[in-house]
Structures are given as C-alpha cells and as structure tokens.
Image (spheres, helix red, strand yellow):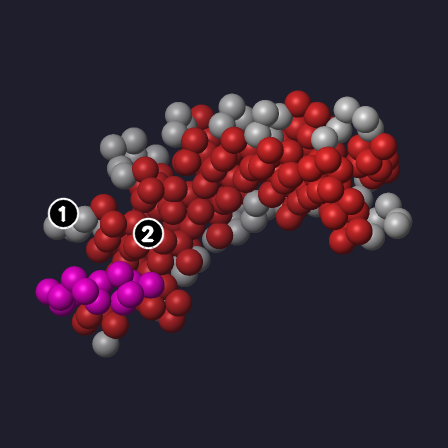
Amino acid sequence: AVITLIEGENDNYFNDAIATLGEIGGEGEALFLAEYLDREDLSDAQRQSLMRACGKMKALSTWNKLVEILENDDENTFVRMYAAEGIGLMKVNKSVPVLIDNYKATDPNLRQYIIKGLVNYPEVIEAKAAIMEGIRDEHWKVRQESIKAVKEMDIKEAAPYLIHRIKNDSEKVIKDEAISSLAVLNTNSGNEFLVSQINDKKAGDATKKKVIEVLLREEHAGE
C-alpha cells in the first residue's frame, strides 16, 4: 500500500510514504528505493528523501548503489551526504576505505556526513584516525561532528586534540563540544585540564560554567 502511494501521481504523499517505507521495509523495499533513484522525473528533495530512507534500512543489497551515488561528483550534494551516512550504517568493514577515500571532498557538508558514517566503526583503526584528523578540519561543522564522534566512540587518545580545540578554536560551539567530549572520555590529562580551567584567570566565565556543568554531570573529577 505504501509503495502504491509512492508510485502514485499525488506528490502530497510522496515524502511521508518514503519515510514510512524506510521504517517498515526490508531488503526488497530497499532495492526498490535504490532503483527508484534512477528516475529522471524526481526533484532533488524527493531524491534526498529516497536516499535518507534507503540508508535507514541498512540493506546490504544496496551497498554498491550507495557507493556509486556517493562517488558521483555530479550528484546532488545532499543525496551524496545521505548515501555516506547509509553506507556507514550498514556496519561492514569494506565501507571504511570507501568513506575515507571520499573524505577529500571539497564540500564540508559531505565531509561531515562521512564522519557520521565512520562513527559506526569504533574498532577500526583507520576510522578512528580519520575522525581524529577531522577534529583539525578547516570547517567548524566537520570539527564539531568529529568531536561528537570521539565521544561516541570513546577515543581516549583524542584528548590532546580536544584540549587544543578548547584552548585555540575560534568557535564557541566547538569549544563547548570539546569540553563535553573531554569530560566523557575521563582521561587523567583531560580531567586535570578541565579542573585547571576553573581557577585559570584567563579562562572566561562561560568556559568555567561549561566545565563545571560537564564535570558535575559526568562525576569523573569529583565535586
């Protein structure tokens, strides 16, 4: 019934039907969505909805199709972004080199979503290395996503990178994200640095407030 709505001529149902199929469909429906992307009469918004739903289904049968879309420089950027995320969600190790190879993309939004894909591989050394590299990315969105990934993947060796961001990053949102992630990692050097910020006369009140907030929340360094 949902597929009938997708194939129907009433576009009012299209996006919601696609989203629904992404939640309830299986391998066959995932292939249907992947093949549907080849239609030339779809808008960019419709293609984005298709790709996002396809990624959510984590169907390995669509892996090659998603890689093809990710590596197509002529494809809509948002479609490629959701392809990168979907490839990562499949959690097969062959996805890691594909994502890393495409990290050189000039569009920061695509790099951000490649990080979203790599976060699913906490045991893969190359994935962790790429995410730590992302902490130093020139664009704040990529840095922010990488700092979130470090926390989720528990990459304790990233603590010095986070300390550097807290000390030197020009974006407050990055400093706050780094403070939160550093507290979660619970390393000796990280906790010592955070505590030192409370008594550092050079640290601003906003920084001190954030540090106290995360230390109390995580309960690692003590009250």
Give the residue displayed 19% in from the left and 71% down from the top: 4
Image vertical order of residue 206 relative to residue 218, above or below: above
Q: In the rendered image, which quarter is residue 2 located in?
A: bottom left
Q: Which residues are magenta?
A: 7-19
Above or below 215: residue 144:
above
Give coordinates of residue 134: x percent, y percent: 56, 30
The CA distance from mark 1 to mark 2 is 15 Å
- Find disc 2 in the rendering and name its residue: 51
State the SS at label 1: loop
Q: Residue furthest bottom?
A: 1
- Res. 123 in view: no
Would residue 95 appear left or right of 200 to someone viewing this image?
left
Q: Which mark is residue 40?
A: 1
> Residue 210: x, y in percent?
71, 42
Q: Measured from the top left, where is residue 118 in percent x and y?
A: 54, 42
Disc 1 packing (10 Å; few <14; some 14–19; many ≥20):
few
- Secondary structure character of the magenta stretch overall: helix
